[in-house]
């Protein structure tokens, strides 16, 4: 799995990880978040490397299936992109209109909280 795939799986795990079993969560976390190898995960969990690979493939399937059905990560990414654009434009407006700085900062604060 390349770097971009790992990042994507880590994000999917953040969004949908609670639907996995405890064992799947452990294995997924060690792989996606801790970036451990199959062998390292195998040593920690007591599962064969092939068993770890199978479990990770199952986790990936579950997580991507949920994203395909619900699209939460996709929606979040789009909202983040739009919010970043809005904040960029507000900062430009603040530079052009220093008298509105306090009001614009308040709007920026609200925009940033929308993604929490």
Image (tube, grey):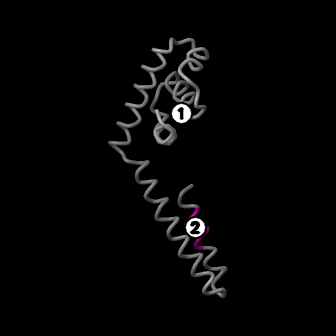
Residue 44 coordinates in the image, percent (x, y): 61, 17
Report the front residue among 68 and 34: 34
**Structural distance between the alpha carbons of marks 1 and 2:** 31 Å
Residue 46 coordinates in the image, percent (x, y): 57, 11
**Residue topped by disc 1:** 32
State left or right for residue 65 relative to residue 56: left
User: Which range of residues does the magenta coloring cover?
Assistant: 107-112
Magenta residues, dominant SS class: helix
Q: Residue at x 45, y 25 (%)?
A: 56
- Classify 25 as above or below 102: above
Residue 100 coordinates in the image, percent (x, y): 63, 85
Report the front residue among 72 and 8: 8
Q: Residue at x 55, y 66 (%)?
A: 111
Report the front residue among 38 and 62: 38
Say whether disc 1 or disc 2 marks the residue closer to the N-terminus: 1
Give me the disc on residue 73: none
Residue 97 coordinates in the image, percent (x, y): 61, 87
Q: Which image quadrant for residue 64?
A: top left
Q: Residue at x 62, y 73 (%)?
A: 106
Q: Residues within 10 Å of mark 2 (few under 14, many from 20)?
A: few
Q: Residue at x 41, y 35 (%)?
A: 63
Looking at the rendered structure, the secondary structure element under dot 1 is: helix
- Classify 97 as above or below 60: below
**Residue topped by disc 2:** 110
């Amino acid at each position: 799995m390349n770097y971009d795939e790992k990042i994507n799986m880590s994000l999917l795990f953040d969004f949908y990880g609670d639907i996995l079993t405890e064992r799947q969560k452990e294995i997924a976390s060690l792989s996606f978040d801790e970036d451990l190898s199959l062998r390292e995960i195998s040593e920690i969990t007591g599962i064969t490397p092939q068993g770890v690979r199978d479990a990770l493939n199952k986790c990936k399937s579950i997580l991507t299936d949920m994203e395909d059905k619900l699209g939460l990560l996709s929606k979040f990414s789009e909202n983040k992109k739009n919010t970043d654009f809005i904040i960029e434009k507000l900062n430009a407006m603040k530079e052009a209109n220093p008298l509105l700085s306090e009001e614009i900062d308040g709007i920026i604060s609200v925009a940033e909280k929308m993604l929490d």
